[in-house]
Image (cartoon, rainbow, N blue to C red):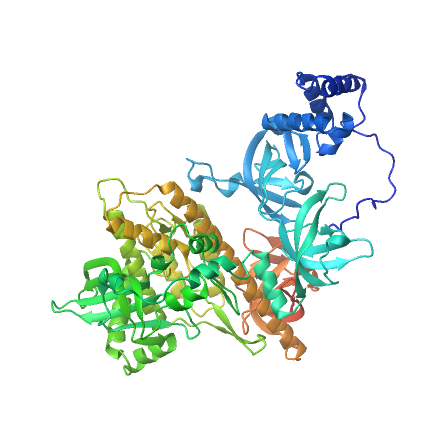
């Protein structure tokens, strides 16, 4: 990482030729421009344009500031400078110049090769890739990683990770890799970064936490905003110091002492641009909503208040957005109601609440807090299906046989009154003992849920059980223990009926206008996996003795068999994680593409509108079509789907960062307490790179890095095709999924990393 240099403090340099010093021909053109500026401002400026282009093309890699052109033409008054500004704008709009900053320009070298618009993905400080942006009319699947453009750091300019850029592409003969040069930053992904400030007598700089941010940010002392040495801050980039190759910025917010719990959690929130609180106007709008339910509103709805209804949620939940009702009908069928909080009754289009919900798109669950999508009055009070309170809901109601065959489905707005709030543990106790409230209802729902699951598996659904973890925190929010979340029948019961409702809503909307124009709907889709990626995974699994069939008809069944065969074995977690990575990512879209992982032809998200914006969209669209509305324009909804998918990824990244922080803190505290001294801890290799092995410690589920450079008994070489390293001298091999033993070498809370030492003798 390059340390910034103070402007004007670059040290002595050899005198270089000034690229802005005009040649003889340029001096003549300059004279004409000066005459035009002072005598006839409206005269043609063709010669002046030629002079500017000749200047920048003589120095194609140099970025010229606007003041360079003022100096070149001795433009000292406002009229002359305005003329030059207009000229620069015209040349840029015609593609003859490229904007290199807010007030900087350089030669447009794009015509030398293919030009592509894409996103920057920094791999390390030495190079990045530019991933082409999807093009309208071109299937996303065709934009494979083979199209990514490799860019050396020296050709990346001021582009940062995530920026939208324009890159000139060149094909090099030595291999099939496309290389390029970034010629324009079209749009910054972000301008604010979290980091630690380091103060010097004449300047300061912020070292960003973000791993893919490879520049320190230069801060003038007048812009440190009271920050003290070593504090965590939020720095905003305001300009670039081209000579020092570092961005220049200002401290926007001081977060606090690095390493403190609140500071680090706020750092994660700032790093992922999560809002700390709701704007006052949004809170006021929420508070103005009346809590009483008018009789006129109840009269419009189907009344379920006399039907046995209950919720099942985690013990620490405060927002209950789904409830189940169950009763035996006179016709011999069972009626199951899946009742969902009617959030869109309260959050109306074109309101501040609506705009804020769209902006956030999802609630984010960090280790010690929730960053909600909706203000507390809505999420925890008005919309939360609390027991013994009348609540407005949007419901999917199914009539089915004793064995779970659905005979009829109804969708619409309802009013309910939950009479029991179960925690998952309480519901599980009822299932196991057959005693307590709603014991018979829970038993029937559980049996039916198992039938639904069996049908899904038979249809090709994949049942990977990934292990999640949760922390026990003390009163100071310090981690005491990390325990895996156990999924029992009570969890699966709720999951199956939520899946039923989501699938039912999607199918209902899709089939409503069969044979006519398709109704626009917000779907949750999951594409079939890329055959090449699945084949690569199958080749790797074969090393462990597992044979997978990767043809389209067999891949689901084969993956489920793998999940059963690996259960309880050291390689279970690694193989399941690699299998998940081999598959496509689920996303929101208006295209009814189906869900591969669930084996559903049509699937939506309908059941969590308190915490997911796409569910609110699904509610609105469903009601629109129930009212007889015509298909809506998909363009607007597709844009909202893309935004929701992006925000979902951001939320997942932030949640992982908070878990990683607490894992590092837990290991650090154990080390300080002397509980790890000289202990070789059992673990499993979960990742291998050319510089080391990632190992998950079995007891705490914490992952750290054991560097190859720390291994003393041999020199190990990395094989990226087999995911393994092999000793050059003795031939010992370490591969993914291997059990090993490690020592904790060091922990770093600020970077959220754990350094490990491999026990080479007992690994």
Residue 49 against residue 383 in the figure, above or below:
above
In the displayed structure, does residue 44 sit left or right of residue 304? right
In the displayed structure, does residue 210 sit left or right of residue 569? right
Q: Is residue 672 visible?
A: yes
Looking at the image, which residue is at 73% across and 41% down?
242
Image quadrant assignment for residue 241: top right
**Residue 254 in the image: x percent, y percent?**
67, 61
Image quadrant assignment for residue 83: top right
Looking at the image, which residue is at 44% across and 70% down?
568
In the displayed structure, does residue 154 sit left or right of residue 741? right
**Residue 311 in the image: x percent, y percent?**
33, 71
Looking at the image, which is closer to me, 8 or 642? 8
View extreme (left): residue: 331
Looking at the image, which is closer to me, 371 or 702? 371
Looking at the image, which is closer to me, 515 or 631? 631
Residue 654 against residue 421 in the figure, above or below:
above
Quarter that holds the C terminus: bottom right
In the displayed structure, does residue 197 sit left or right of residue 408? right
**Residue 428 in the image: x percent, y percent?**
34, 77
Question: What count of labels does the image hold?
Answer: 0
**Residue 92 in the image: x percent, y percent?**
62, 28
Residue 332 against residue 70 in the figure, above or below:
below
Looking at the image, which is closer to me, 83 or 548? 83
Residue 437 against residue 209 in the figure, above or below:
below
Q: Is residue 457 visible?
A: no
């Amino acid at each position: 990482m390059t340390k910034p240099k103070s402007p004007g403090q670059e040290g002595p340099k050899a005198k270089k030729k000034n690229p802005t010093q005009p040649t003889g021909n340029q001096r003549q053109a300059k004279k004409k421009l000066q005459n035009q500026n002072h005598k006839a401002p409206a005269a043609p400026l063709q010669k002046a344009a030629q002079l500017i282009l000749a200047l920048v093309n003589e120095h194609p890699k140099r970025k010229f500031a606007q003041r360079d052109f003022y100096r070149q033409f001795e433009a000292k008054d406002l009229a002359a400078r305005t003329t030059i500004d207009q000229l620069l704008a015209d040349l840029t709009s015609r593609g003859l110049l490229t904007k290199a900053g807010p007030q900087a320009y350089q030669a447009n070298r794009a015509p030398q090769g293919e030009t592509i618009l894409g996103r920057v993905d920094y791999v390390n400080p030495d190079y990045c890739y530019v991933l082409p942006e999807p093009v309208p009319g071109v299937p996303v699947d065709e934009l494979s990683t083979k199209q990514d453009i490799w860019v050396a750091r020296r050709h990346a300019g001021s582009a940062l990770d995530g920026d939208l850029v324009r890159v000139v592409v060149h094909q090099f003969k030595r291999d099939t890799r496309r290389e390029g040069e970034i010629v324009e930053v079209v749009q910054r992904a972000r301008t604010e970064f979290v980091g630690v400030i380091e103060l010097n007598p004449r300047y300061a700089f912020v070292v960003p936490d973000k791993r893919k941010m490879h520049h320190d940010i230069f801060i003038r002392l007048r812009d440190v905003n009271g920050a003290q040495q070593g504090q965590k801050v939020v720095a905003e980039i305001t300009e670039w110091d081209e000579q020092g190759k570092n961005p220049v910025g200002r401290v926007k917010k001081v977060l606090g002492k690095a390493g403190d719990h609140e500071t680090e959690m706020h750092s994660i929130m700032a790093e992922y641009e999560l809002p700390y609180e709701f704007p006052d106007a949004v809170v006021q709008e929420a508070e103005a909503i009346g809590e009483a339910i008018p009789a006129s509103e109840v009269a419009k709805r189907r009344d379920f208040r006399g039907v046995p209804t209950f919720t099942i949620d985690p013990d620490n939940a405060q927002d209950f957005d789904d409830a189940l009702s169950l009763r035996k009908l006179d016709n011999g069928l069972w009626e199951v109601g899946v009742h969902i909080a009617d959030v869109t009754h309260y959050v109306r289009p074109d309101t501040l609440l609506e705009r804020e919900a769209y902006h956030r798109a999802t609630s984010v669950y960090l280790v010690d807090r929730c960053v909600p999508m909706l203000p507390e009055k809505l999420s925890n009070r008005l919309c939360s299906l609390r027991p013994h309170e009348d609540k407005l809901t949007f419901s999917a109601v199914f009539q089915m046989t004793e064995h779970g065959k659905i005979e009829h489905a109804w969708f619409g707005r309802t009013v309910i009154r939950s009479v029991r709030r179960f925690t998952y543990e309480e519901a599980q106790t009822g299932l196991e003992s057959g005693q307590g409230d709603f014991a018979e209802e829970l038993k029937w729902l559980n049996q039916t849920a198992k039938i639904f699951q069996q049908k899904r598996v038979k249809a090709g659904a994949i049942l990977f059980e990934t292990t999640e973890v949760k922390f026990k925190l003390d009163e100071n929010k310090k981690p005491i223990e990390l325990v895996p979340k156990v999924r029992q029948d009570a969890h699966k019961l709720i999951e199956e009926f939520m899946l039923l409702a989501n699938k039912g809503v999607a199918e209902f909307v899709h089939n409503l206008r069969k044979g006519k124009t398709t109704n626009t709907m917000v779907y949750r889709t999951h594409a079939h996996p890329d055959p090449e990626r699945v084949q690569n995974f199958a080749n790797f699994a074969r090393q462990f003795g597992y044979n997978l069939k990767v043809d389209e008809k067999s891949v689901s069944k084969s993956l489920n068999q793998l999940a059963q065969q690996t259960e309880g074995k050291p390689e279970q977690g690694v193989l399941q994680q690699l299998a998940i990575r081999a598959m496509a990512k689920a996303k929101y879209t208006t295209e009814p593409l189906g869900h591969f992982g669930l084996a559903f032809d049509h699937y939506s998200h309908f059941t969590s509108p308190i915490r997911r914006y796409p569910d609110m969209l699904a509610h609105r669209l469903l009601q629109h079509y129930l009212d007889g509305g015509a298909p809506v324009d998909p363009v607007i909804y597709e844009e909202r789907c893309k935004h929701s998918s992006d925000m979902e990824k951001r939320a997942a990244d932030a949640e992982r960062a908070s878990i990683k922080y607490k894992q590092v803190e837990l290991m650090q505290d154990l080390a300080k307490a002397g509980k790890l001294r000289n202990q070789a801890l059992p673990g499993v290799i979960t990742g291998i790179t050319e510089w080391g092995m990632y190992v998950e410690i079995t007891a705490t589920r914490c992952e750290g890095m054991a560097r190859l450079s720390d291994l003393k008994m041999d020199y190990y070489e990395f094989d990226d095709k087999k995911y393994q390293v092999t000793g050059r001298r003795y031939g010992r091999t370490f591969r993914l999924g291997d059990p090993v033993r490690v020592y904790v070498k060091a922990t770093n809370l600020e970077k959220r990393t754990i350094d490990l030492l491999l026990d080479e003798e007992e690994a």
